[in-house]
Amino acid sequence: MKLLYAFTAAVTVVSGFPVIDNLPPDVHLRAAELATRTLKNLEAQAVHPHQPVKRQSLPLPSDALGLSRAETNCGPSIPCPYFNEEEQKISVEGEYAYASPAPDQIRGPCPGLNAAANHGYLPRSGVATIEETVSGLNKLYNMGLELGAALAAYAVIIDGDLLGGTWSIGGPQQTDALGSILGNGQGLSYSHNSYEGDGSIGRNDAYTNNGDAHSLNIEKFEAVYAVGGNDTSEDGFDQRYTIDKFRSRYQEVQEHSIATNPYYFTGAFSTVVVVPAAYNFVINFMSNHSEAEPSGYLDGYNFKKFFGVTGSPGSFVWNKGQERVPENWYKRPTISPYGLADVALDVGIGYLAYPNTLRFGGNTGSVNSFTGVAVSDLTGGVLDAKNLFEGDNFACFAFVLLQQGIPDFLKGPLADINNATSFLKPFLSPILDKLECPELGDFDQSLFNDFPGYKYSPTGPATNY
Ligand code: HEM
């Protein structure tokens, strides 16, 4: 499918990176070797009991809202055609038994990663290599290998240790005596505007919570829990969550942020892609794929387990660091991984179905002062609100955002490698070779200079779960 290849052409647009003094000259070579080895090993290990399911190519929908409402918990273009108990049952015993994190172990803003680390599918330390990430998330959630590699490689580059090839799912990694961490090394918890962004499903906007965008806000959780129905029992078995309900909730959260956060900002890869994708991840990765419902369903019980929440509406409690994989929980069938193309499609469908959620800009220092920046101004007139969703354009744009939408002042040593692409490219290239992207050129970040939220960059303690 063409969308899957959304990234190649954009890579060519920005090729030619200067080699710089304070990075070892072989860093790009090592990235390429690591990427090749990682993807090769993992492909070899992956179990493919059946031929992969053929994905449908989706034309631009004339009824995006209808499409959104009809979408199952399996994703936008892939069926989950069978249930296979042995293959899909997730072990929460033995080496995968739950354990609360020790004080020196890191947890952060992402319940999917926290639960994976609490069960040993990711290193329990909360610091992982790209290979560990790809393998662990594939095993636990059936995340597409290429998606795991891209997300982890981006984390290494933007908030991790470029030399060590590791990243932290929470706060900053400890540096060794020589201070070996390159890049910001702040970890996901303090990656505001580079990975973490405003308008999250359960976390506060960083500015409104003294820089803490990794702790669950229980009132916010209560509000999103309510979109699943009226079951107020402690079990919550009758609640049902769909991607469409979450897309609609995202619009409410954005509006609330604009009304309460003077520094609300959206325009970076984090806010345009990662934040809405995280809403979609709840449905596509946390749903239980049972014999009765192979496409998956998410009830209140499993939603709470994954988010580390106990109690019932009105008395919910967030148990910090205690995110769990439920017992008797079945992941997506092996044949139907959720990958990079699905992320782009799902985020794109969300913007088409709820057009008010596609925003670039921010508040200008007071609440309810949202000022937008036009897509055409950001892209030198190449894309506009109309053609953004034609063909591969949105995916091309998302990748340009990924490469260039990181505020320059957040890049630290990365600014020297010009942008993240040279490290990322080998991780993406195996899957990216046929995209039809317009020549997008440079993303004009100076248009964001007037938004105080664009420059807000909190840092934090080393461990913080
Ligand atoms: C390498 C893989 C992953 C990375 C790098 C990653 C990164 C992140 C980041 C940076 C955030 C903060 C975004 C925000 O500000 O809203 C986040 C949030 C989130 N992630 Fe992940 N994630 C990964 C995998 C997953 C998986 C597998 C799941 C589901 C099983 C998941 C579910 C979520 C959810 C639900 C949130 C929003 C939490 C909230 O706002 O309460 N993520 N993730």
Image (tube, rainbow, N blue to C red):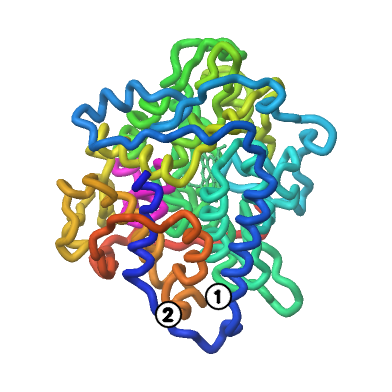
Which badge, 2 or 1, comes first in the chain's sequence?
2
Q: Secondary structure at mark 1?
A: helix
Side of 447 relative to 290 (left or right)? left
Q: Nearer the viewer, residue 40 or 204?
A: 40
Residue 298 percent coordinates (x, y):
53, 21
**Ligand 1 within 8 Å of the CB at mark 2:** no
Instruction: Name the outermost residue toward the right.
Output: 94
- Where in the figure is residue 359, as x and y percent of width and height? 26, 47
Q: Say which residue label 2 marks.
A: 17
Q: Where's residue 358, x and y in %? A: 26, 44
Q: Residue at x 69, y 25 (%)?
A: 89
Residue type, label 2: Phe
- Amino acid at circle 1: His
Circle 1 is placed at which residue position? 28
Q: Rate crowding at label 2 as few (under 14), some (14 to 19) or many (20 or more) other CA atoms within 10 Å.
A: few
* Nearer the observer, 4 or 308: 4
User: What is the spatial separation of the Cα atoms under label 2 and label 1, in whole angstroms?
Assistant: 10 Å
Q: Residues within 10 Å of mark 1 (few under 14, many from 20)?
A: some
Residue 346 in the magenta stretch? The answer is no
Magenta stretch in the rendered image: 257-276
The single residue placed furthest to the front in the displayed view is 51
Q: Give yes or no for residue 274 being in the magenta stretch.
A: yes
